[in-house]
Structures are given as structure tokens and as C-alpha cells.
Amino acid sequence: MQPREREFFYLPVYIGNIPVNHERVMVSVSTSTGKICVFRGVSYEMIRDLEECDFLYPTLAAEKAFGLYSEYVRFRLRWFKDLEDEDRPVYRLIYEPITTGQKGFSLDAGCNSGLRYVDACSGELIWKKR
């Protein structure tokens, strides 16, 4: 088996102890020289710009964030088959969260656009990418 010419590393991006919205960088390093061959992902300049922002402390009150989030989430009740007994099955009633971009939606719609969270500084609603 021949030695590899390059090693690849996939690293999460953090600022302080906070992950940057699931961003990753890929770095390829030459095994003979130790030099970086390829860097893909968030640019170093963008990471430096993000470090200058004050993300360590939220500027949005928790009550305000809850108010923004609660406008787009509803709960649907459904039965979940939890255990199977010898004589009869056991069901549990669960609350299933449903989020959508429309405030007045039907619980029977079954759509879940994936509201992930509320930005703690700007109050922006962050939706799941499709």
C-alpha cells in the first residue's frame, strides 16, 4: 500500500464555543511538505468578520423570542404505538410540533417547513434549508 499524498480534514467552524450554523471547512494537507493544498468552506475573512461581532450574549429577550417563534408553531395530537402487550397494544398520546411560514394554517395540513430557531441577536427566524 502506497502512502497517501494528501490527508483531508473536515472541521466544524466555531466562534468562541458557538458553532456557526453547521458550517464546516475542508482542508487538504500534503503529507510530504505539510502545506495546505486545498481549503474549502467559509472564508478566513468571513470568520474574522464574524469574530468581531458580539455573539456571546443575546440581545433579544427570551420572552420576545418565544413570541416570535410561537406565531409559527402549533401542536398536533396523535397516537403513538408504544408497546405491544400479549393481549393488546399500548398507545401513548404525543404532541407533534408543526411549523410553517403561514400563521393561519390547518393542523391537518401535515406540512412542516422546519422553523429551526430564532436568532438571539437579530430576532430573525431561521428556517431549515430544503
Image (cartoon, grey):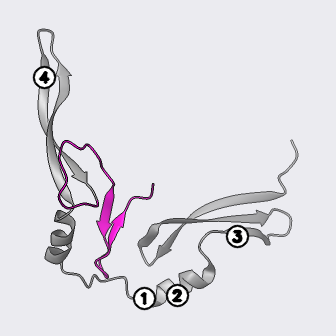
Check disc 4 and report its element: helix, strand or loop.
strand
Of the image marks 1 and 3, the number of the one nearer the N terminus: 3
> Dot 3, how many residues are within 10 Å of its Cα: few (below 14), some (14-19), or many (20+)?
some
Which type of secondary structure does the marked residue at label 1 adopt? loop
Q: Who is closer to the viewer here, 5 or 46? A: 46
Residue to which mark 4 is pinned: 90
Q: How far apart are marks 2 and 4 (CA)?
A: 54 Å
Tell me which residue sits at (12%, 32%) in the image: 92
Instruction: Judge whether residue 122 is colored magenta.
Output: yes
Spatial separation of the CA atoms under disc 1 and disc 2: 7 Å
Q: Which of marks 2 and 3 is nearer the N terminus?
A: 3
Q: How crowded is mark 1: few (under 14 residues within 10 Å), some or many (20 or more)?
A: few
**Residue range corresponding to the magenta coloring:** 101-130
Q: What amino acid type should be assigned to the residue bearing mark 1?
A: Cys
Looking at the image, do the residues carrying marks 1 and 4 touch, with CB atoms under 8 Å apart?
no
Q: Are marks 1 and 2 in contact (CB under 8 Å)?
A: yes
Question: Residue at label 3?
Answer: 39
Which circle's residue, 1 or 4, is located before the other in the chain?
Answer: 1
Disc nearer the start of the sequence (4/3): 3
Q: Answer left or right for 53 relative to 101.
A: right
Q: Which amino acid does label 2 sit on?
A: Asp
Residue identifier under label 1 = 53
CA–CA distance in space, label 1 to label 4: 52 Å
Quick one: label 2 or label 4, which is nearer the N terminus? 2
Residue 49, label in figure: 2
Name the residue: 19% across, 53% down. Answer: 105
Q: Quadrant of the C terminus?
A: bottom left
Q: Contact, CB < 8 Å: mark 4 with mark 3?
A: no
